[in-house]
Structures are given as C-alpha cells and as structure tokens.
Image (cartoon, rainbow, N blue to C red):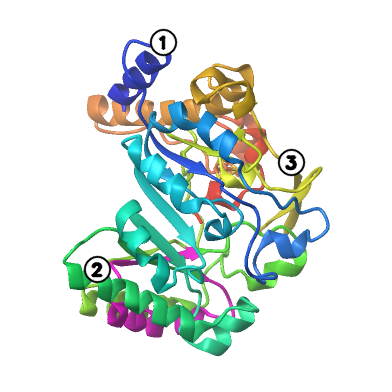
Amino acid sequence: MRNWFREFWQGLVGRQPLHLDYLQVEVTTRCNLPGCRMCPRSAYPDQWQSQDLSWENFELLLPTLARFKQIHLSGWGEPLVHPRFWDMAKVARGQGCKVSLTTNGLGLTEAVHSQVLEHLDMVAISVDGAQAATYEKLRPGADFNRLIHQIAALCARKQEIGTRRPEVVLLFMKMRPNLAELPEFIKLAASLGVDRVNATNLDFIPVPEMEPLAVVSSGALDPKVEAILQQAEQKARELGLPFRNFPLRPTVDLLVCDANPLKNAFVTACGDFCPCVNLGLPVQGGFTRQFLGRTVPTHNYFYGNIQTGGFLDHCGQPAYRKFTGYFRNRVGRMHSLLTDLVQHGTVATRPRPGSPSASRSEPHYPWPPACQGCLKTLGF
Ligand code: SF4
C-alpha cells in the first residue's frame, strides 16, 4: 500500500508516469430500452439528460486515458447506441489500455462480433434472469431469447478461433423478482460458455418505490434467501464456473468502497470528472438515494471538466483532494491496525458504530459527506 502511495505521489509531481487502475468513461446516457424497473432513468424520466460524449471531448481525454490501466466505456446509458462506440474502443486500446464494456447485450449482434473480438478485453452483459418472463418484466422491451442466442454465438465464435479474449462476464443483479432463478442462471451461464458470473446487488435505489426490488438487508437474511445463494454457489463449484456473489448483508468497517476513488475515476458524457457513477447521475438538480429504508437527499460531485484540463490537471484541485482525503484517512486507519498487529500481535478495538461509547468519539474516519446514503459504503 505504501508503494502505491509513493507511486501515486511521484506520478502527481511528475517524477514518473502516473498509472491508476480504472477510468470509467460514460459514452452516452441514452438507452435502447424504454425504462428498466431498476434504472434511475425510470425514477427521473423528466429530469434525465440524454446525451452522447462528443468525439471532440473524447479526443481531449486521450492523454488521460494513457494514465489508466483499464478504460471501461460505460456509464448510466447503453454504450452500444453511441454511433462511434467502436472507434472509441479502438482508439482507447491504441493508448495501451485494456478496454472493457458493460452492456445490456442487445446490440451485441453477430454483425459486431468481429469488433468485440478485436477491440475489447472484457465485456460484461446484464441479464438479470434465467427465464424470459422474469427478465422481460424487469427490462420491458428486451428480448431474452435473442439476447441468449447472441451471447451463445459470441462464445462460440471465441471458441472457434481459439481466443480467450474478451472475457465474457454475465451480470445478474439480485432482486426480489429474480433471486429464485440464480441457481438456474448459473447453469444457463455455464451452458453458454461464458467466463464468469457476477451476482451484483441493486446498490443505487433512487426512490422509495424501487426499494421493494432490493434484497439487501441490514438484519438477518431470510433462510430461503440463504438457501438460494448456497445452491447457486454449489452449482457454480460443480460446474467450475467462476462466480462472485456480492454480499447481501453489510460489511462491517469497510474502509474503501468497491468504486475506490483512490485508484479509479469516472468521466460523464458531459466531460465532467467525478469519483464514481453514483455521484455523476445525468439529472438536473439534486436527487435522492434510499439507504435501508431512509431517503437521503444527495447531489452530484464534480471536480473538473475535460474542456478545462485532463485528470492530472483536476486531481490537484481542492475539491478532489478533499474528497479523496476522507478515503486516505480510512486507508490510514488500516495501516495503523496492521502496524499494531505486526508490532504487538493485537489491534486496539474501537467501539461499534452506533454504540454509546462510539457516539462519544465518532466520527473517527468518516466517509465523505457526498457518500452518505450510498449503499456501497456497506459493501453491497
Ligand atoms: S461510497 Fe458510493 S458515492 Fe462514495 S465513492 Fe463509493 S460508490 Fe461513490
């Protein structure tokens, strides 16, 4: 970790090239589906700002791309509707980065399979159901059978030409209407020949009406839910299919969220830099997030625009340094725990959040104010 800080700092002061992990580039906020049940666009249809990343702004991003190991060409829209998506993927690859994509898969027709094989290192496809009726209810307007056929054809093409790239990952967002199908979904994924399944959570719930879709819980899990998860994990083991199952219960004392703004960044379709997708929603004004039954008002958090400089110009700005400072403090907490452990063989315990002794001393290492109410602070 210390080496990483040294590399980061030396990169900032120009002593060596700065290489961060992952830049997420939102190429569009438009979509080819009218409104999925779990999508924030369905919650904010009137405020949603539909737009594509312009080619001019993409070109301004090129020096920034070279600073990251991986470019993920996805945000809140469906990337494959951008008319120049494949040009962007090709150019990003030319910067020496790995290039990846999250898509609803409907645009992965056989006509674009050559581009997929040539320009992508990883493609993640959101499927969210093992049966057509469940999937199509969650994603009105989508065609399950066509999607499955396209995924099978892509995997068969990879096999035919003997390539491992791109890695094909299926994303199954665990929600109440589809959870029971997870074990069957693992079987389906293995039969298609994909490389991996990630069972994610609905971790951004903009309005109370969407909360009943979520399975995440602050309390004990329903035994039926536990049984489904165990069956899915067992099935994946039997079939030898790599499977990442995101936790449905909070991770106590998580130091850094999955988005990890210390190593990663996000650029919106407007060219704004921000820490993560959850702080760069394409809506005007503020918005809300549901946090275990509470509605938390929030807003976007931008620290610069590509029109006024690249990531290196903006990451020295007070807004960025202030935001990431909260995360650095939290990582510093881990250093001190590890140091205690190595030097003394034990760590000083601290009160559990919410306990009477904690309220006297909290906050020790708070999350940034902009992250309050984000379910990713609980590791979901
Ligand atoms: S906690 Fe949430 S809002 Fe904060 S950086 Fe992580 S994903 Fe973004």
- Rendered position, 82 above or below 362: below
Q: In front of the other: label 2 or label 1?
A: 2
* Distance from mark 2 CB to nearest ligand 1 atom below 8 Å: no
Task: Name the amino acid, label 3.
Answer: His
Q: Residue at x 37, y 17 (%)?
A: 11
Q: Does residue 99 appear to the left or right of 135 in the view shown?
A: left
Q: Position of residue 309 (x, y in %)?
A: 57, 21
Which numbered disc covers residue 299? Answer: 3
Spatial distance from mark 2 to mark 1, Cα to Cα? 43 Å
Front residue of 363/139: it is 139
Range shown magenta:
174-200
First in sequence, mark 2 or 1: give its number.
Answer: 1
Q: Position of residue 132 (x, y in %)?
A: 52, 87
Spatial distance from mark 2 to mark 3, Cα to Cα? 42 Å
Q: Residue at x 25, y 58 (%)?
A: 165
- Quadrant location of residue 138? bottom right
